[in-house]
Image (tube, grey):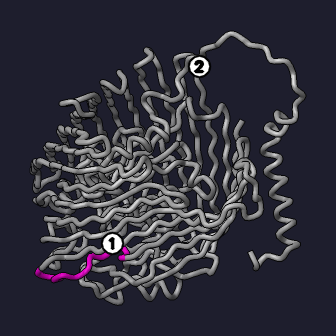
Amino acid sequence: MKFVTTEFYQSARMALAACALFGAASFVSAQNAPKTNSVTLPEVVVKGAAEALTVPSPATAREQARQTPGGVSVIEAKEFERGRVSNLKDMLDYAPGVFVQPRWGAEDARLSIRGSGIQRTYHGKGLKMMQDGIPVNLAEGSFDFQSIEPLATSYTEIFRGANALRYGGTTLGGAINMVSRTGYDAVPFQARAEYGSFGHTRAQASSGGVMGEYDYYASLSHYSADGYRDHAQVAAHRAYVNVGWRFRDDAETRFYFTHAISDTELPGALTHAQFLNNPKQAISVDKNQRRDVVLSRLASRTVIGNDASRWELSAWWSHKDLDHPLSSAYIDQSSDDLGAELRWRSEGELFGHRNAFTLGFSPTYGANDATQFANNSGVKGAQTIDVVQSAWNLDFYAEDQFYLAPKLALVAGAQASRAVRKLEDRLPGTQSNEQSFFEFIPKLGLRYDYTDKIQLYGNVSRSFEPPTFGELYQTTARYLDPQTGSTFELGTRGESGRFTWDLSWYYSWIRNELLTVDPTLSTTSTVNAGETTHHGVELSGSVRLVDGVFAADANPRNGDQIALKLNYLWSHFRFSDDPNYADGPMPGLPEHYLRAELLYEHACGFYAGPNIEAVPDSYSADFANTLHARSYALLGFKTGYRGKRWSAFVEARNLTDEKYVATTTLTRTGGAGSAVFYPGDSRAVYGGLEMRW
C-alpha cells in the first residue's frame, strides 16, 4: 500500500474499525458481560420450516445447480441490489453466459444466451422465461420483459442451453427462472426509493411474513424515466402477491398474482450519421411510436413429498393487451394463455448406486386476437389485418442422474415436443393455415466432483424451437421449419482459496435458424437460414486480491477485502456456406464482451469501487457485414452501505461520457442510410435508499 500515505491509512483504518465496532456491538457486549452461575434448562425443541417447499432457498438452489452437468448459475438479489435496479441488465450483467442490452435504457432489450433470439431487441424469444418455475412465455414461444419485477426477486437461476431440461426447456438459449421472495425470507415491511439522471424514479414497498401454516409476500412498485433520448419516456407499475399454505409437513400450495402496466415511448433506431450528429434525437415522434402493455397473471404451484419422492403440480393463466403504434402500422392485440405442468422426482438407489429420476408433462395453449391498422400519427386508420392466432404445445420430458461412482454422475434425458400454430383470417382474401412441428430432443452428460467444491462436466444435446407468431405471420402467412441444433459443451465450476469460477465452452451446429436473411423479401420477413454455427466461451469468476486492507483483524466481523469480479463472453457465430453470406459473421452480438468490477468491501456493510463494460472490437449490424457498431469502453463507480435495517448507494455510469451504440437492430445489407443503431446512455448518476423493519 505504498500509494497511501501513513496519515490517510491510519485515518481510514480508524474509521472502518469504528464501523466494524458498531456492527459487532452485541458481540463485544456478550464477551465483556460479568460471569454468572450457569443454570441447566430443559431441552426445548422448536419446529418450523426454514424455507417454503414450493420456493427453495438460494442455498438449496445452488446445491441443485451443482447436480447439473452443464452451465447453470444462481444470482442472488443481494448481488445486484447494491446499485440501480430498473431492468434485466441491472440484474443479469454478471450472470455467466447472459448477454443483455436494453435498446434505450428501458425494459425491452436484446436478451440472448448462446445466440438465442439473436435478431430480437424486444418481445424476447429463444429462451424459456419463468417465474418460480412457471413459464412467463406465451404459448407461441415469445415473452414480455414488462411482466418481471426485479425487486420482488430473491434469486435468479440461469440454465444455459439443454441444461434447462429439468424445466422442460428445449431452445438453444435454455431458461431463466426468476424466483420470488416468500414470507419465509421477506421482512414484515420494506421500502426502497431510487432517483437519478434522465428522470429515473424508482419506488417499491413490500411486506412478508409467516402466520401459522400460511405465509405471504406482497410487492408494489413504480418505475418511470424520461430517458436519455427524445421520445423515450417509460412508466411502469407492478403489483405482485404470493400466498403459501403448508397444509401438511410435506405438502404446500402457493398462489401467485401479477398485474403490470407499462407505457413506453419508442425513439427508434438511427443511421450512423444521425448517431454521430445527435444520438439523443428520435425519429418516431411524428408517428407517436410506443409500446403499451397491460399484463395480468394467475398461477399456482403445489408440492407434495420429500427428497425420496416429490410431486409438483403447476397451473397458470395470463392475459395481455398490447397497444403498439409503429412507423407504418398500428398493432392492437389481446391474448390469453394457459397451461399446466406435472413433474415427479424420486431419489434413491438403483443397482446399489445413488440415482435421481425426473419425469414431467406440460400442455400449454394460447390464443391471440390480432388486429392491425394504418398508423395516422398515433391514431388508428384503416384496418389491414384481422386474425386469430392460436398455439398449443405438448411436452414430455424425463431425466435420470445415475452415480457410476460416488464422485461421477451420468445424466441422460430426453424430451418429446409437439407444437401447433394456427391462423384464422377474418378479412376477405383469407390466408388461414395451420402448421405442426414435432421433435425428439435427447441429452447425455457427465459430471465429476473433483472435490467438494470443484466440478468438471460435459454434455451433448439437441435443441428445438418452433417459429413464433411474429415470424410465421406478418402481412402474409409463411411456412417455416423449426430451428434445430446439436450442441457439445465442456466446463468447470468451483472455488479454491481466493478464486471462484464458472467456465463453459460450447459449439452448436444450427439448422434452419430463424433469421431475416433473404435479400428478395422485405426486411421484416423471417425465413429459415441454411447452416450456422454458434461457438463460444462463457466465463464468470472472482478473486479476492487483498485481505485486511485497513482492518487487519483475525475476527471476520471486523475484516475487509478488495475483490475483482468479471464476466466475459466470446461469441463466435458464423454462417456456413450460405449462398448470400458465405462464411461471414452473424450480426447483432459483439464477439467479445467484458464486465468487470474491482470492489472494496468491509464486513460492516460498506463497499466502494470502479467497474467497466467493454466491447473491444467493432461488430456487424447487417448480415452482409458492411455496417458496423464501433467498439467502446464504459467506466463506472459505485459506493454504498448495506446493513440489516437500512441500505444506501450512489452509482455513476459512463463517467467519461462515451458516445456508443448499446445494441442494434438487424438489416440484410447495410448502407449509410440504414437506421439500425440504438445509442447508449451518456454520463449518469443514480442514488437510492432502502429501509427494512
Determine whether 401 is above or below 607 in the image. above
Q: Residue at horizontal 18%, vertical 71%?
A: 532
Q: Is the magenta stretch mostly helix, strand or loop?
A: loop
- Write the start and end of the magenta stretch as one range: 579-591
The residue wearing badge 1 is 571
Helix, strand or loop status at disc 1:
strand
Determine whether 556 is above or below 661 in the image. above
User: Of all residues shown, which one is farthest toward the top?
Assistant: 42
The image quadrant of residue 390 is top left
Determine whether 126 is above or below 209 in the image. below
Label 1 crowd bin: few (<14), some (14–19), many (20+), radius 10 Å: many
Magenta includes 588? yes
The circle drawn on residue 211 is 2
387 and 381: which one is in front?
387
Q: Nearer the viewer, mark 2 or mark 1?
A: 1
Determine whether 663 is above or below 644 in the image. below
428 to the left or right of 611:
left
Residue 340: x, y in percent?
Answer: 28, 32
Magenta includes 331? no
